[in-house]
Image: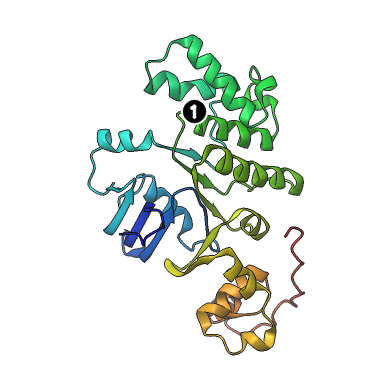
Amino acid sequence: MAEPGTKEPIVRCTEVVKRFGSQTVLKGVTFDVAEGEIMVIMGGSGSGKSTMLRSMIGTHTINSGSIELFGTSICGLCEEELNEVRKKFGILFQSGALFNSMTLAENVALPLQEHTDLDQEIIDIQVKIKLELVGLREHADKYPAQISGGMKKRAGLARALALDPKILFYDEPSAGLDPVTSAEIDQLIIALTKQLGVTSVVVTHEMDSAFTIADRMAMLDQGRMLCVQERAWFENLRDSTSEEARTMDEDHRLVRQFLRGDPDGPLTARRDDSGYENDLFGMTTDRVTRTPSVEPTRG
C-alpha cells in the first residue's frame, strides 16, 4: 500500500526476470511509477532498458516476477485481455512507426476506428484535436515521406494519444533528432504530462533529455536496477567532484560516469578487462587516447 498522502503506483514492476535462451537480460528489476509523474529509465546499450519497456507493454513475456498496470498484473493474461489493457496506454516508438500509405490524419484515426464505435465525424474532430496538441493540425493531409523526422515523432505521439491513454511509453523519443528538435520533443512531453495528467515512462540514453524532463530517474546496467531516485539526487551525483567519487562504491561511480559521459571509470574499465586486444591481436595494444567529455548543452 502507498504511504498516506501519496498516490498508488500506476506501474509496479517487482523482481522482473527476463531470459532469452541462456542469456538473462533482466535480473530481478524492481521499481514503481507514480501516477502523473515522468519516469526516465536510462542505461547504456545492452543494459536491458528496451527489454524492460517491451515487458511493460506486454510484447515480451517475463520469466518470473510481476508487472502491474493500473493495479492489475499483466502476467499470464491472454492476448484479448492484454489488448484491453493496452487501450489504456499509448506508445511512441523510436521510429514513429507510422503507416507510410496513410496520411497523418489517417494514422491518428486508425486506433479510434479500430477500438471505438464513434461516428466518423467525431473521429475527425478527435484527430484534429490530437494533431493540434502536437502542432501538426495543418499537416494532417501529408504522408510520412513528406515530413521531417521530428514531425514523424510528433505524429506518432498524436496517434499514441488517440484513445486518451493514462500512461504514455516513449522509446528513445530524441533518437536521431537534431538538438533543437530534440528540445522541442522534451518540452512537448512535459506539456502533455501536465496538461493531460498522463503518466510518462521514457526510455532514453540521452542525458540532456533525461535531466530536462524527469521527475524521477532509474538506472539499469547489465540487467540490474542500480538505483531509482529523484532527479535532484542524480544531479548531485553527476556534479560531484573527483575526490568525492573516490569514496563511492562501484555502482555509484558507474552511474556517475554514465551521467557525465566521462571517458574513464568503471564502465570503460569493464571493457578494458574483456580481453579484446588479446583476442584480436594475441598481444596488448596501446589504448586510443581519450579526450574529456563535452559539457551538457541543456540543463
Regarding residue 122, the answer to whether it shows in the image is yes
The amino acid type found where label 1 is placed reads Ala
Q: Position of residue 136 (x, y in %)?
A: 66, 26
Regarding residue 101, the answer to whether it shows in the image is no
Q: Position of residue 269 (x, y in %)?
A: 58, 81
Q: 287 or 240: which is nearer to us?
A: 240
The residue at the point 76 percent across, 67 percent down is 294
SS of the residue under disc 1: loop
Q: What residue is pinned by disc 1?
A: 162
The residue at the point 41 percent across, 58 percent down is 5
Q: 265 or 186: which is nearer to us?
A: 186
Q: Position of residue 223 (x, y in %)?
A: 42, 66
**Badge 1, how many Cα within 10 Å: few under 14, some, many 20+?**
many
The residue at the point 58 percent across, 70 percent down is 233
Q: 15 or 268: which is nearer to us?
A: 15
Q: Position of residue 284 (x, y in %)?
A: 62, 85
Q: Is residue 211 left or right of residue 11?
A: right
